[in-house]
Image (tube, grey):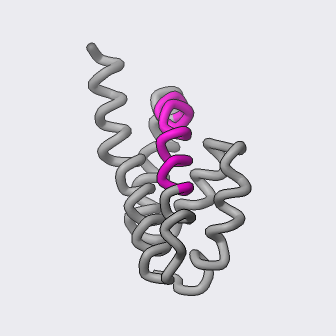
Amino acid sequence: MLDTTLAALVSFFLIGPLQAEISKRLEAAGAPPTIVADIASCGRTATPALVERATGDPWWAATTAVGIWLGSTKADAVLAEAAPACTPAIDAARPFLMSRQT
């Protein structure tokens, strides 16, 4: 039960904001829907790795979540670290992510 609760908290405070930040930036920059969908898929792929990292290192989870909320931590960098297989999708999205810093 504790694992389920912790996973839900990580999802709410870290993964949700991470995915929302990336999607918001991509949509604001006019990224094609396929790129937005690919990044969302990568977010789902990265979820288990992010939950595992966050449960093993709560300090990382807290500082990363706050950093994403404040804009000092790049959400795409966190995603790339958690899901290396998503590098092509992140690389395709990067021009759109860099075109408008929010």
Residue range highlighted in magenta: 38-53
Residue 91 point in image, percent of width and height: 71, 64
Residue in the foreground of this view, choosing between 39 and 52: 39
- Quadrant for residue 24, please give it: bottom left
Q: Residue at x 56, y 33 (%)?
A: 49
**In the picture, which quadrant includes the C terminus?**
bottom left
Residue in the foreground of this view, choosing between 22 and 102: 22
Residue 50 point in image, percent of width and height: 52, 38
Looking at this view, name the residue that lies furthest to the bottom: 99
Q: Residue at x 42, y 53 (%)?
A: 65
Q: State whether residue 71 is above or below residue 5.
A: below
**Residue 33 belongs to magenta span:** no
Residue 52 point in image, percent of width and height: 52, 28
**Residue 46 belongs to magenta span:** yes
Q: What secondary structure characterizes most of the magenta part?
A: helix
Q: Residue at x 30, y 33 (%)?
A: 8
81 on left or right of 73: right
**In the picture, which quadrant includes the N terminus?**
top left
Residue in the foreground of this view, choosing between 22 and 6: 22
- Quadrant for residue 35, please give it: bottom right
Looking at this view, name the residue that lies furthest to the top: 1
21 on left or right of 13: right
Residue in the foreground of this view, choosing between 13 and 98: 98
Q: Residue at x 43, y 65 (%)?
A: 23
Exactly how many numbered labels are in the figure? 0
Residue 57 point in image, percent of width and height: 52, 33
101 on left or right of 91: left
Q: State whether residue 65 is above or below residue 99.
A: above
